[in-house]
């Protein structure tokens, strides 16, 4: 296998990347040479031979054999503290309570055909309706987040009678053709040709760089302007907090967006697929802002890091389209997915994970600020709960991205047993299991500290 063979189409600019690894560089070859055994390399070659190559996924870095709690372990027995987890590991990998409940359910009712229902699915729908505030009381399940976004878009059209959608550039909502049409990541639309019509996008309210740099009010004015000029817009789809490179809007921002949506008759669809269920210290991230969406999209961690499970929660009054197949997925009321989700919610409540994350947030904020004070490479730190971004720059005044340096730090950390995602080319994104202990958090920060220190001035 030629490890430098691109799984990505050539020519995509680094500034268009916000979602993950740049895996076509010589650094990955060096990683294999220094860290990967011959038996593992043979499996990686076979993986590259039989899987269709794609951006962000190919070629693979290593071969895993097991996972537990906040850790991954490869075939050679090397452990990684996983601060990536595809945002599915809120309760860690293989939590005993989730596994136990799943095993019990597998022997009882592993699958439910569509014309029937089952008790776990009903219990989960009831639980989510109880957890969600206000009038968010109607649920549909689906196996993945992209499908949840698709259901939300279909429901918004039915409710409003309008087909146009407003979203943010650089946003990620999933990878299916309909969803990349409303998302804002350029690399997902390469070579795709015509996409779903009726999508308007605005630049995101980033705090450190970009067209609205340090000026959320300008973003709000832009949104207001677009909504006033496009009466056909029926939905505003957005991530409450952007997960990839960790963009956290101010407390005031979402209140004003909610007001604008009400003013123009637009449904607010919030995508919390990667960040709900305690990641921000709340069950749902929008609770930080004192607002309520019209439709909420959930996924990833809902399945306990084991089962694929996603959902939408919508307002009770939207339950008037029984003649439309909004979802109609084969695993729509999966007993296994429902049991995994119920067990996950039980872990979050019984182990008081939300309180723990709130305490961890303060510790992370202080620790990362100390890190920033020591390293001129760190231009910005930002985060909430156990979701943090460290933005590496060549110069704090110009804020020029330190892309090569970020990649060096990533591979150095991998060598020391810490895995995370690089977003936007230069942002170290930290998203550990919420069950991680303080000693493990400190170990991760120490590894990052030493890896940045190793960069040449």
Image: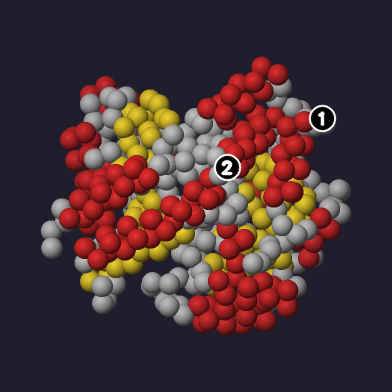
Left or right: 22 in relation to 117: left
Residue 192 appears in the rendering: no
User: Toward the viewer: 113 or 340?
Assistant: 340
* Whole-percent x, y for residue 106 in the image: 65, 21
Mark 1 to mark 2 CA distance (whole Å): 30 Å
* Image height of 39 relative to 206, above or below: above
Mark 1 and mark 2 residues within 8 Å of each other at the beta carbon = no
Q: Residue at x 37, y 33 (%)?
A: 72
Left or right: 397 in relation to 12: left
* Whole-percent x, y for residue 429 in the image: 38, 54
Q: Residue at x 57, y 58 (%)?
A: 285
User: Toward the viewer: 41 or 243?
Assistant: 243
Q: Secondary structure at mark 2?
A: helix
Q: Residue furthest top?
A: 107
Q: Residue at x 56, y 60 (%)?
A: 239
Question: Quadrant of the image for the C terminus?
Answer: bottom left
Question: Quadrant of the image for the N terminus?
Answer: top left
Left or right: 211 in relation to 30: right
How would you rate the neighbour count of disc 2 (Cα within 10 Å): few for under 14, some for 14-19, many for 20 or more? many
* Whole-percent x, y for residue 443 in the image: 29, 44
Residue of label 1: 116
Residue 3 circle label: none
* Image height of 326 relative to 195, above or below: above
Give the mark, 1 or 2, whose residue is nearer the N terminus: 1
Q: Which picture quadrant has residue 260?
A: bottom right
* Image height of 58 relative to 321, above or below: above
């Amino acid at each position: 296998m030629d490890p430098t063979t691109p799984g990505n189409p050539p020519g995509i600019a680094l500034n268009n990347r916000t979602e993950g690894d740049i895996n076509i560089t010589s650094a990955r070859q060096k990683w294999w040479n220094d860290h990967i055994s011959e038996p593992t390399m043979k499996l990686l070659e076979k993986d590259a031979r039989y899987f269709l190559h794609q951006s962000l996924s190919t070629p693979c870095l290593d071969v895993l054999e097991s996972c537990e709690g906040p850790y991954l372990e490869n075939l050679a027995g090397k452990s990684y503290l996983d601060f990536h987890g595809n945002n599915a590991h809120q309760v860690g990998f293989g939590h005993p309570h989730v596994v136990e409940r799943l095993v019990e359910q597998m022997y009882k009712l592993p699958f439910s055909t569509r014309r029937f229902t089952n008790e776990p699915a009903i219990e989960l729908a009831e639980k989510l309706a109880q957890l969600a505030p206000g009038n968010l009381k109607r649920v549909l399940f689906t196996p993945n987040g992209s499908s949840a976004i698709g259901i939300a878009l279909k429901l918004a059209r039915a409710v409003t009678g309008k087909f146009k959608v407003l979203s943010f550039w650089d946003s990620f909502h999933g990878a299916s053709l309909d969803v990349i049409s409303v998302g804002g990541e350029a690399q997902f639309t390469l070579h795709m040709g015509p996409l779903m019509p009726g999508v308007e996008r605005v630049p995101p309210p980033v705090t450190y760089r970009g067209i609205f740099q340090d000026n959320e009010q300008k973003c709000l004015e832009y949104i207001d302007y677009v909504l006033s000029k496009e009466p056909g817009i029926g939905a505003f789809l957005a991530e409450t907090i952007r997960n990839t490179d960790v963009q956290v809007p101010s407390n005031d921002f979402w209140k004003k967006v909610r007001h604008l949506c009400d003013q123009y008759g637009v449904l607010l669809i919030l995508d919390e697929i990667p960040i709900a269920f305690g990641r921000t210290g709340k069950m749902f991230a929008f609770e930080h802002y004192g607002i309520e969406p019209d439709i909420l999209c959930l996924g990833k961690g809902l399945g306990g890091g084991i089962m694929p499970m996603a959902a939408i929660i919508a307002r009770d009054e939207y339950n008037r389209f029984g003649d439309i197949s909004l979802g109609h997925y084969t695993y729509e009321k999966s007993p296994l997915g429902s049991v995994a989700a119920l067990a996950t919610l039980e872990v979050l409540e019984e182990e008081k994970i939300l309180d723990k994350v709130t305490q961890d947030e303060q510790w992370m904020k202080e620790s990362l600020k100390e890190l920033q004070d020591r390293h001129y490479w760190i231009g910005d730190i930002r985060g909430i709960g156990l979701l943090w971004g460290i933005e590496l720059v060549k110069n704090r005044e110009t804020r020029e991205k330190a892309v090569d340096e970020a990649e060096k730090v990533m591979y150095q950390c991998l060598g020391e047993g810490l895995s995370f995602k690089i977003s936007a080319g230069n942002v170290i994104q930290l998203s550990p299991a919420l069950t991680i202990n303080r000693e493990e958090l400190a170990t991760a920060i120490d590894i990052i500290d030493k890896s940045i220190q190793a960069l040449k001035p």
